[in-house]
Each structure stands twice: as structure tokens, then as C-alpha cells.
Image (cartoon, rainbow, N blue to C red):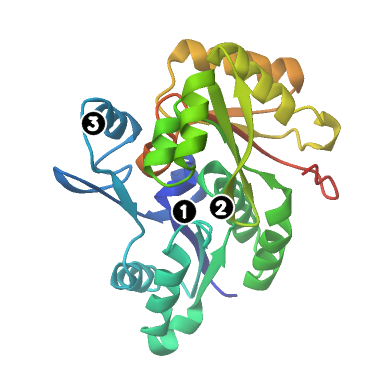
Amino acid sequence: MVKQCITTECVCDLPEDLLEKLNVDIIYFHIYTESGCFKDTDEINAQNILEYMENGGTISKSEAPGANEYKRFFQKKLEDYDEVIHIAISSGISNSVNNSSLAIARMGAQGMKIHVFDSKHLSSGMGFMVIKAAKMSREGCSTKEILDELEHMKSLVSTSFMVKNADYLFRNGKINKHVRNLCNAFSFHPILYMKDGVLTLKGLEIGNYQRASRRYVKKQLRHRKRIQKNCLFITHANCPIRKIQQIEKTVQDCCKFQEIIVNSASATVSSNCGPEAFGVLFVLKKGGNII
């Protein structure tokens, strides 16, 4: 029987204790600032990077690991496993898939044992796929069975975020200056959604951020009958506890989930969305696409 392992990247935004429980190892993205280069989630977190940016920091750039880093990472895993299934952030927003594929090409025959899966999602959206793959691996499913299930799962994961401050999106090239100015002038809060592997502007909520947040949650969960109720993630960029509690209450008023996992977004995700951005992420039932 093939001994396989599941790996992913720190931008999956899964709690550390859950990753340990699932026996999933991660490779770290890099955050570059005026002060140097830091490993995301290991040496720098959402709170660190947002405080830095709010206090005059001008450089905040995130990058996927290089091909040689992936090569070393995969070779280390092959010391204990026959095959590796690596679940990567969407190729539409990162060089992760490209760099890990380059690593495989440099590994010769060893590279045949590595399977890079382009999740077409980010944050806890790809995290759902990591959880699924790890559970299937534990149950003895083959690599093909796992990859086939993940491929089907892509269209069922709902990954979206609401952003409080449009300046961060403009700074990172996610929206143009005209949209940024409109958001600031009229208290518009952008809604971002992963579609076909790309983070797109889905809509805008207007006015007081607390009330706008409730509207965003209610709209995301309005088709409750089509949503799997076992788990929902509230993934946030340094939101205050009171705000998290408000979001949780709104979620439960809309849809009763067996488990709600609240987790901080990685520095990579947070530096692109800005403080108090948050998302409600979940999985639809098969045949339940609502987009």
C-alpha cells in the first residue's frame, strides 16, 4: 500500500492544532518589508503586518517559496513517504503552482512521486480541500481518488471576503484608483470572491461597517438549503473580539452549522485585504452551485 502524505502552504489559513491533528505539513510564503524578509505565520502574522502598515510602513510584498525551497521541502517528505499530494493556492493569484512544478522537474525520477494540485482558491477555501484530502488519505484512499475528489470540490467551495478599507486593495493592484476613491467617498466596502481561480470584485456594501458586515453574511448564506452544514470558517484580518462575536451570531441566525472555526488570516492574505477584513467560507452540497 502506498504511503502518502498531504502538504500545503501557510496561506491555507487553518489553525495550527488542526494541521497537527491532520498530520499536514506546510511550506511558508515570504513577506518582504523595509525591515527584511519574514516567513509568513512563522515569523510574522496578520497583526504584525497590519500594525506595521498602519504605522507608516510602505513596503509589504508577499511571495511564494522559490523552486529550490519546494524541492527541499518535497525531498524531505519523501524520506518518510512514498508519495506527496501538495495542495497549492490558486495559480491565478500566485506563482506557487509554477514554482512547485519547477521543483518537480528538477527532481528527476523523484518528481514522479509529487502531485501538485491547483486548488483555484486561497485561505480557508483551500483549507477545506486540505482537510478533505487528509481525511481521505487517513481512510486509505488512493492518490487518484483524492485528486479526483478535490477536482470536483473546486466548484463547491465558496471563498469570499468583505473589506473595510479599500486602500489596501488599491495598493496591491486589486482595484483601480477610481474604485478606491468611490469606496472612500461613499463608505463602500468591497466584496471579493474567488471565481475561476481569480479574486474578483463581486459587489459593494455601503454604510456603517457593522451593519454592512451583517448584510454580507446574510447574503452569503441566503441559500442555506444548498450549503453543507458540517463546518464554516470565519477567517479574519485582526478583527476585534466583539466583531467576531457579532459575525458568529449572524451566521448562526442564518444557518445552523455543526462547527464554526474562527481563525486569523495569514499575513499574506491580511496585507492584501487590510484590517478588519473577514470572510465566511463554506462548502456547497453537490449540485448546489449558487454563483
Which amino acid lies under the numbered mark 2 shown in the image of this protein? Answer: Val
For the C terminus, give its image quadrant: top right
Q: Could you say which disc has been placed on residue 24 in the image? A: 1
Q: Nearer the viewer, residue 237 or 74?
A: 237
Task: Give the residue at the far left of this rendering.
Answer: 35
Please, what secondary structure does the residue beneath circle 2 have? Answer: helix
* Image quadrant occupied by the N terminus: bottom right
Question: Disc 3 designates what residue?
Answer: 52
Question: Is 86 left or right of 30, judged from the image as shown?
Answer: right
Mark 3 or mark 2: whose residue is earlier in sequence:
3
Q: What x and y, as percent, mark residue 145?
A: 70, 68
Front in this rendered view, residue 203 or 15: 203
In terms of sequence position, does the residue under pointer 2 or pointer 1 come before the other? 1
Query: Which one is in front in this view, the residue at disc 3 or the one at disc 2?
Result: 3
Q: Where, by quadrant of the figure, is residue 124 drawn?
A: top right
Residue at the far bottom in the pictured view = 109
Q: Is residue 27 left or right of residue 243?
A: left
Camera sees residue 248: no
Q: Which residue is mark 2?
A: 130
Q: CA distance from mark 2 to mark 1?
A: 8 Å
Residue displayed at 52% across by 28% down: 182
Q: Tag 1's secondary structure?
A: loop
The spot of residue 207 in percent (x, y) is 58, 14
Whether the residues at callouts 2 and 1 have beta carbons within 8 Å, the answer is yes
Residue 65's quadrant in the figure?
bottom left
State the SS at label 3: helix
In the depicted structure, whether residue 254 falls above or below residue 118: above
Answer yes or no: do the residues labelled 1 and 3 have beta carbons within 8 Å? no
